[in-house]
Amino acid sequence: MDNKDIETSEDQKSQASAFEEAASEKGIVAEFWEFLMDNKKFWLIPILLVLLLLGMLIIFSGSTAAPFIYTLF
């Protein structure tokens, strides 16, 4: 192996560890919130809220809360 191969391998390891370190710092919600704020994608917030509400409706429709949910509609 050449010195170039060794240096390349060490660079890849340092890049991989930097990636793992950056990935472990924040959760997915914090990352997404930062994405929304940095890229001014505020129009995504209502879409996500509607999707979350529909998901909750589907989950709770099979539970004991179903009679209370159906009275809303």
Image (spheres, rainbow, N blue to C red):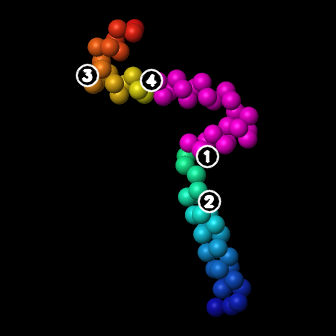
Q: Which residue is mark 3?
A: 64
Residue under circle 2? 22
Residue located beneath label 1 in the image: 31
* Among the 4 quarters of the image, the one containing residue 38: top right
Q: In the structure shown, which secondary structural element does the residue marked by tag 4 occupy?
A: helix
Q: Are marks 2 and 1 in contact (CB under 8 Å)?
A: no
Q: Is residue 3 above or below residue 58?
A: below
Q: Earlier in the sequence, mark 2 or mark 3?
A: 2
Residue 37 x, y percent position in the rendering: 71, 38
| Image side of residue 13 versus residue 57, left or right | right
Q: CA distance from mark 4 to mark 1?
A: 23 Å
Of tags 4 and 3, the one toward the viewer is 3
49 is within the stretch colored magenta: yes
The answer to which image quadrant residue 2 occupies is bottom right
**Residue 12 spot, x, y in % from top left:** 64, 74
At numbered mark 3, what does the secondary structure look like: helix, strand or loop? loop
Read off the residue under disc 4: 54
Q: Looking at the image, is 64 positioned above or below residue 15?
A: above
Q: Main secondary structure of the magenta part?
A: helix
Where is residue 21 drawn, in percent x and y? 59, 63
> Do labels 2 and 4 touch, CB within 8 Å?
no
> Distance between the Cα atoms at labels 2 and 1?
11 Å
Q: Mark 2 or 4 closer to N-term?
A: 2
